[in-house]
Amino acid sequence: MHQVKNIPTDRLPDLLRAMPKAELHIHIEGSLEPEMIFSLAKRNALTLPYASVDELRRAYAFTNLQSFLDIYYAGASVLLTEQDFYDLASAYIAKTAIDNVAVCEIFFDPQTHTDRGVSMATVINGLHRACVEAEIKHGISASLIMCFLRHLSEEAAFETLEAAMPFRDKIIGIGLDSGEVGNPPEKFAKVFAKCRELGLHLVAHAGEEGPPAYVWTALDLLKVERIDHGVQSSKDALLMARLKKDRIPLTVCPLSNLKLCVFKDLRDHNLPQLLDAGLCAMVNSDDPSYFGGYMNDNFLQTFAATGMTAQHAYQLAHNSFEASFLDASAKRLHIDKLNAVFETF
Ligand code: ADE
Ligand code: ZN
């Protein structure tokens, strides 16, 4: 393992900001800021059930995943046109560029939109245009992962896959999100097998609120390459050994876990434990506009709360590039740049 030189604690925040990193777990609809909800509602002549941005923000007090999802799906209903989707993704990319995110693999939930009559073309073309521009404007490699909503049926997932096929070249992979408990990975075994045949990368949310058993079935039945969240894995020693042996990445989202009451306090978060056990975990923002922070907020608050060190910071950034779906030579370039930042800091 790369040995990191001693960096005093008071310089850690600057290091966390400066180091290049990849974000592998960001729902683009979760980056929809309250101000943009209001401006898109105005542009699309929609009436919101909130009188002001402040009133909407006050509703962001969540007790669990479902209490968040109800508000998150309602917020996404202001997205109607290709321009809306482009503006949403462009705003996220501009913010994440400031946080020195060099690679982002962005989730989107097409069923949230197609079920309201928005076409798949509108969603994907708008998001994809912003991803192409990310490289030109910011030097960021941005790509799209299409998620199936697990509270809906596998049949609906198959229909969504079919509708996305004309845009196959604009997505790199498939994910699984929404309410976890009661919707185990095995519900989607057939559609994931089909996506695998199509050569799509596979990931799934598992072990966010759900039990370690869901992480096992995501790995063994869906054959995913990464687990989104996965923090419940630390309850199962055999699973921890499996994740370590196969170097399965866990895309951990500390502020999300705090706001959705997965951990009572950031000081209790098990990210240091996962890293110290040798797992390929890294930091992500999940739904930054709802959970109070983009990438660097996640890093800064989690390090301040847990006392993680510069060695942990290096490992998290390294893991993020390693776990990305870039090819080996692109990963090498990013890791070389990461090493240069740590050597010259
Ligand atoms: N969709 C958006 N954010 C999510 C999360 N944290 N878990 C499951 N589904 C989601
Ligand atoms: Zn998520």
Image (cartoon, helix red, strand yellow):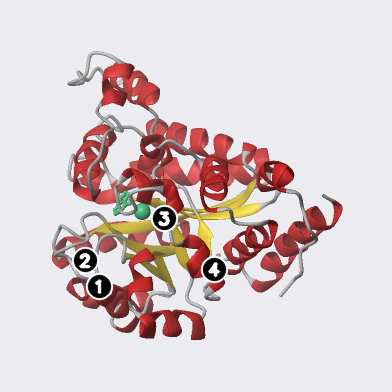
Q: Amino acid at mark 4?
A: Leu
Give the label, 1 or 4, closer to the camera.
Answer: 4
Q: How far is mark 2 from mark 3, CA to CA?
A: 39 Å
Q: How far is mark 1 from mark 4, CA to CA?
A: 32 Å
Q: How far is mark 3 from mark 4, CA to CA?
A: 14 Å
Question: Residue 332: where, in percent of width, then height?
Answer: 72, 68
Q: Identify whether 99 is placed above or below 242.
A: above
On whether ligand 1 comes within 8 Å of the CB at mark 3, the answer is no
Read off the residue under disc 1. 191
Crowdedness near tag 3: few (<14), some (14–19) or many (≥20) residues, C-alpha within 10 Å: few
**Mark sitting on residue 268:** 3
Kindly indicate whether the residue at mark 1 contacts the one at mark 2 (C-beta within 8 angstroms). yes
In this rendering, would 261 be left or right of 186?
A: right
Tell me the element at label 1. Answer: helix
Where's the N terminus, which quadrant? bottom right
| Mark 3 vs 4, N-terminal side | 3
**Which residue is at 31% across, 25% downward?**
57
Read off the residue under disc 4. 275
Q: Nearer the viewer, residue 277 or 93?
A: 277
